[in-house]
Image (cartoon, rainbow, N blue to C red):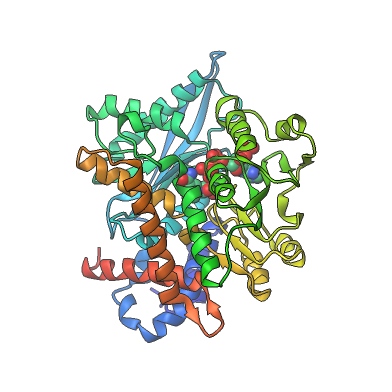
Amino acid sequence: MTSLDSLDALLDHIETRDPHQPEFRQAVEEVMGPVFPYLDEHPELIGDGLLARLIEPDRVVQFRVPWIDDKGQVHVERGYRVQFNAALGPYKGGLRFHPSVNLSILKFLAFEQIFKNALTGLPMGGGKGGATFNPRGRSDHEIMRFCQSFMTELFRHLGPTTDVPAGDIGVGGREIGYLFGQYKRLANAFDGTLTGKAVGWGGSELRTEATGYGLIYLAQHALEHRGEALEGKRVAISGSGNVALYAAELAIECGARVLTLSDSDGFVHDPEGLDTEKLDWIKALKQERRGRIHDYAQAFSGVRFHEGQAPWGVEVDLALPCATQNELDDEAARALTHNGCAAVLEGANMPCTAGAVRVLRGASALFVPGKAANAGGVATSGLEMSQNAAHRAWSRDRVERRLREIMAAIHEQCIAYGEGDDGVDYVRGANRAGFVRVARAMQAHGVV
Ligand code: NDP
């Protein structure tokens, strides 16, 4: 086998083996690019073919998911679970229901997840899964039938000490409920195999808010480290799903001015900024009525809807991309920095393209990658696993305290591994800190 002792060799190896997986290649480049220079001083971390083992998932499950719509028509979707790495604990990572789901995207997400989970300090490996199913416009019963069919195959690969999925795009509280119901029925077990459950039946307090809140805690630490504060900052947020809405909620509470939200139809710009009342209206629109973000522009005066566009042309101090991967490219990054935006934190997974990250760094903007910035969600899932294993439910205060501690510790690790003469490089810090923890565990386990 060729030696994989340089980034180019590693990427060539991936391209030869999996030429149709550009997102996975992008994720490996993103993680390993900043790690390689560190390995020059720590070659012991990659003995015994560690890198070749690291980029190969432990297991990939792909399966057929047939389901019947309300008109009696049969549909067949493709389901997946990528169990990438269990060096630190059971596979842990969300399920995504979206027509764009494919193996490349899930391998990218699962690979990133390994190091994100490592950063939390909790005992969790990395995985990700999902299906090509598009929940948009489907009735509750259609969603339920799909979830049941999906779980009918997946359940045999899961378990509280084996693999513990959660939600992601298209999989929220309702879907977790249906998935758990079917898992419980097939496994004949009420256990902590899924996280993101409702608080009344095994879920953790604050899990719903955790990714968005964690993002804001991290933003506060990163800004404070630069001698700045979140209060008074103008913020552009993309998306209007789980991450975006709770990031907006806490940002508003902290005195920031949230000017935008979006969905896949376009973005809304509210020059006055959102307040709690407006946000509650949007939550009801998205979570109860399952409406579109342009309805907000119709319901409130002074708000404009920009069809088919992302919010990165708006003049802001801070940008929080919270929708999907590759939604902020180099051109968007140039528009942001041109308008004076000095900080971008990734609420979504890999929303910034490599070109965008280069532009932001070139402009000396603060940039925090998703694996540090959005780790609050999986961290709270880890806390949900602990509560389930102990048959206990912690108070909201206790979960919030732990989440704050975890985000503070993630920020500390970014500084420990990423601080240099020109400030903190969060990409370097997060990737190196995560990698070191995983590599040490893999070395301890031998060649497996
Ligand atoms: P949701 O499904 O709740 O919301 C996703 C939002 O992004 C929706 O507003 C959706 O609009 C929009 N969106 C999706 N695809 C596109 C697209 N191609 N172009 C423009 N807008 C789009 O997902 P989450 O909020 O849970 O997740 C958002 C991101 O955060 C994902 O990258 C996810 O992996 C990541 N993440 C989520 C965590 C969590 O705890 N939920 C944890 C860590 C990361 P529409 O309704 O029109 O599709």
Q: In the rendered view, tell whether residue 260 sits above or below residue 231.
A: above
| Left or right placement of residue 438 versus residue 447 in this view | right
Q: In the rendered view, tell whether residue 445 sits above or below residue 379.
A: below
Q: In the rendered view, tell whether residue 388 sits above or below residue 36.
A: above
Q: Quadrant of ligand 1?
A: top right
Residue at (34, 53) in percent of width and height: 402
Can the viewer see residue 427 in this picture? Answer: yes
Which percent across, then down, holds residue 129? 43, 44
Which percent across, then down, holds residue 73? 55, 17
Q: Nearer the viewer, residue 350 or 65?
A: 350
The residue sitting at the left extreme is 390
Residue at (31, 43) in percent of width and height: 384
Which percent across, then down, holds residue 249? 55, 44
Q: Nearer the viewer, residue 4 or 138?
A: 138
The count of marks equals 0
Quadrant where the C terminus is found in the figure: bottom left
